[in-house]
Amino acid sequence: MLARSTQRLDIDLLILPETNLILIASVIEPLRGANRISGSEIYRWRLLTVDGDPAPTTSDIPVPACAPFKATADTAPLFVLASYNWRQSATPALKMQLSQATRYRTMIAGIESGTWLLAEASLLDGYSATIHWEDFEDFALAYPYVRASRERFVIDGKRLTTAGSLPTVDLMLEVIRQRQGYSLALEVSRLFSYEQADFHSEHELSPSTVSLRMRDPRVAHAIRLMEDNIEQPLVLARIARRVGISARHLQGLFQESIGAPPHVHYLALRLNAARRKVIETKASFADIAAATGFNSASAFARSYRASFSESPSDTRRRLRRRIMLAQERP
């Protein structure tokens, strides 16, 4: 699931009663955004409930299910979503189904209170896992065989866990980053005007930090300079001087704040700008290369392919085929 791939990834979401709508959206919307930006269906999801009936949510808006959850030989990653009153769903039958599902599923994720259910089914024994900050102490005491963590999300082998809705967005962006690269993950985050927290913050979660931490203002200044200078990229030393620190210091701040060095972030900004021009305009690749700071069309094409696993020409051909197929449908 987390290996670099251009293949479509199918994900099953088991939604328990009284789950927050924002929690469901935190899983689905980044994937929808990745599909939209990439111009292809690289993610597909299926909504399941215990009995196949629509799941009641805390917003009194029922979420329809595609099917009831069953412990079949399906290998798609399984995300277990829960917010409140998870114990009502933790029946012996469901815990047995989850245990049986682990024989086949490539990964199982506990999303917010879904972590409780996985732990109750003994599926987190020997794993590191996180939980909502309000529940941390109780969770750590209840499941001594689980290594309780205060991180926003935890990936430990075939187990994924998150500490809330916004940390779930962090997790989904990390899934996209590992599968399709930093450029697409960055563009998805920008689609929602979302500033991502450090993936591996050591700060404990609390009421004041459960929302996203503000980025270091020097990093924010540097990113604004990058965004304002796409056509003629600035060298790192010049950006650092304008921010008022050394290049080495700026590199460290980037790594701490967004989990990537400056040059990776800058290149992703330029490639994303180029990709939009490839998709939305008929400009030549030479013109697009010049407009996004590449010294030749060939250099642009190499970077584009390395980031998006297809050439600019491939992107345009693929989109033309989609348009033609859509026009042919009755």
Image (cartoon, rainbow, N blue to C red):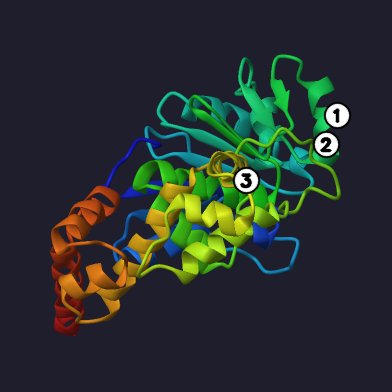
- Depth check: 136 or 152 in front? 152
Disc 3 marks a residue whose amino acid type is Ser
Mark 3 touches mark 1? (CB < 8 Å): no
What is the crowding at mark 1: few (fewer than 14 residues within 10 Å), some, or many (at least 20)? few
Considering the numbered disc 2 on the image, is that residue within a helix, a strand or a loop?
helix
- Depth check: 260 or 262 in front? 262
Mark sitting earlier along the chain (3/2)? 2
Q: Position of residue 165 (x, y in %)?
A: 67, 52
Query: Which is in the foreground here, disc 3 or disc 1?
Result: 3
Considering the numbered disc 1 on the image, is that residue within a helix, a strand or a loop?
helix
Does residue 103 lie above or below 206 as drawn? Answer: above
Quarter of the image with the N terminus in it: top left
Disc 2 marks a residue whose amino acid type is Asp
Mark 2 touches mark 1? (CB < 8 Å): yes
Tell me what residue is drawn at x 61 percent, y 20 percent.
127
Query: Disc 2 marks which residue?
Result: 135
How far apart are labels 3 and 1 at the CA level?
30 Å
For residue 145, what is the image quadrant?
top right
